[in-house]
Image (tube, grey):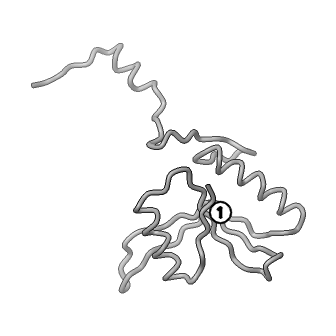
Amino acid sequence: MKSTVSAAELRVLLSEPKRSKYKAKKTELDGVVYDSNAEANYAAALKIREKAGEIGGVEIQRPFPILINGFSVGVYKADFCFIDHKEDGRLRVIDVKGFDTPLSRFKRKCVEALYRVKVEVVK
């Protein structure tokens, strides 16, 4: 059974913005679009801390390839990475989550095992 869509209905369907799976709203801050308002708020706080000299080397969406026995099985993208000067220059990896899925927990565990860093979840 075929269903047809009129040209007017198609225009309406195509003009609707794509909704996030977990209802997060993309938010722009200083010309950068973040996946959620929570991420944008965290980025704003990082900017303040960076200006104060507490942290440095802030990276957004840093990829961590997940390699097992020489084969790429995926990539984990950290929301934020930075050097914390207050903690003896330790690399901090941050994942801002509104809703945590089994897949994201698994990827974090892989990154922690492969790269020997602690991925911190911020809600």
Residue 66 x, y percent position in the rendering: 44, 75
Residue furthest toward the bottom? 69
Residue 30, above or below 15: below
Residue 106 x, y percent position in the rendering: 42, 69
Which residue appears at 59% of the width and 41% of the height? Answer: 26
Q: Is residue 43 left or right of residue 100?
A: right
Q: Is residue 67 something one can see in this rendering?
A: yes
Residue 8 x, y percent position in the rendering: 35, 13
Question: Where the N terminus falls, by quadrant?
Answer: top left
Q: Which residue is mark 1?
A: 80
Residue furthest toward the left? 1
Which residue appears at 90% of the width and 63% of the height? Answer: 52
Residue 103 x, y percent position in the rendering: 40, 62
Which residue appears at 80% of the width and 56% of the height? Answer: 47
**Of 103 and 11, which appears nearest the observer?**
103
**Numbered marks: total:** 1
**Of 12 and 100, which appears nearest the observer?**
100
Residue furthest toward the right? 52
Residue 73, above or below 69: above
Q: Is residue 92 left or right of residue 116?
A: right
Q: Is residue 54 left or right of residue 34?
A: right
Dot 1 amino acid type: Phe
Which residue appears at 38% of the width and 84% of the height? Answer: 70
Residue 102, above or below 19: below
Callout 1 secondary element: strand
Q: Is residue 61 something one can see in this rendering?
A: no
**Of 72 and 110, which appears nearest the observer?**
110
Question: Where the C terminus falls, by quadrant?
Answer: bottom right
- Residue 120 image-quadrant placement: bottom right
